[in-house]
Structures are given as C-alpha cells and as structure tokens.
Amino acid sequence: MAITRINEFRARDGQTVALRDFLRSVVPDIEAADGCRSVRLLEATGDDSALFVIIEEWDSIEAHRASADVIPQAQLDAALALLEEPPGGNYFEDASGP
C-alpha cells in the first residue's frame, strides 16, 4: 500500500520567493528517489502565501526514510534560514476504502 507524506514549510517574512525556488529545485531530486511515486509542491493562496506544502507518495515509509540523503545536508541547512519555524510533516494512508 502506498504511503503519502505531507510536509509543511512556512517562509520567514521576505523569504517566500527564495523558499519557493529552493523547494522547486529539490522536487526533481525527490521524484528520482527509489520508491517515490509522485511529488507535488503547493503554495497557499491569499493572505497565507508564505505557506508551502509538499505532498509525496511513496511505496512505503521505509522508502521515504531511505531517501533522506537525496538532498545534501548543506543545502538543507541553508534552507532552514528561509523558514519561520521548523518544517512539519506526517505520514498518511488511504482511509477511504473498507
């Protein structure tokens, strides 16, 4: 069964464009990881445009966790300076069926 990972990122004041650019730049790396089925980057509209969500679909939680090295740590560290708060995320499974 596929697992969905939903990650939230909130940009610091004045860093929305830089955060968007960073997140866009890492989507192809995530998509290329073993076990990744899809990745979508979404940006909130209206007054909350500093909020971004990445929705990832994976073969398993283990596949997602194994992909941790896809983005170099130095790049992740630089992105942290763009964030208002630490990123959040959770795993989800499809609960719509019997």
Image (cartoon, rainbow, N blue to C red):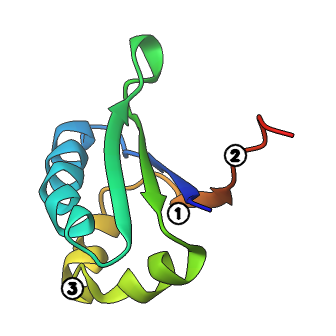
- The reply to whether the C-beta atoms of the residues labelled 3 and 1 are less than 8 Å apart is no
Please report the residue visible at 41 percent of the width from the left and 11 percent of the height from the top: 46
Q: Earlier in the sequence, mark 3 or mark 1?
A: 3
Secondary-structure class at tag 1: loop
Residue highlighted by disc 1 = 86
Secondary-structure class at tag 2: loop
Q: Camera-side residue: 90 or 9?
A: 90
Q: Can you name the residue that lies furthest to the right here?
A: 98
Q: Earlier in the sequence, mark 1 or mark 2?
A: 1
Q: Nearer the viewer, mark 1 or mark 2?
A: 2
Instruction: Give me the C-alpha separation between circle 3 and circle 2.
Output: 31 Å
Crowd around label 1: few <14 · some 14–19 · many ≥20 (10 Å): few
How far across and down, in percent of the image, does residue 32 sit?
19, 69
**Image height of 50 relative to 65, above or below:** above
Crowd around label 2: few <14 · some 14–19 · many ≥20 (10 Å): few
Residue type of the residue flagged with mark 3: Pro
Q: Camera-side residue: 73 or 4?
A: 4
**Image height of 34 relative to 83, above or below:** below
Secondary-structure class at tag 3: loop
Residue type of the residue flagged with mark 2: Asp
Instruction: Give me the C-alpha separation between circle 1 and circle 2.
Output: 26 Å
Q: Which quarter of the rendered picture does the C terminus lie within?
A: top right
Q: Camera-side residue: 34 or 80?
A: 34
Q: Splitting the image into 4 quarters, where does residue 83 fall?
A: bottom left
Residue highlighted by disc 2 = 94
Is residue 25 left or right of 47 when viewed as pictured? left
Q: Nearer the viewer, mark 3 or mark 2?
A: 2
Q: Which quarter of the rendered picture does the N terminus lie within?
A: bottom right
Residue type of the residue flagged with mark 1: Pro
**Image height of 59 relative to 75, above or below:** above
Residue highlighted by disc 3 = 72
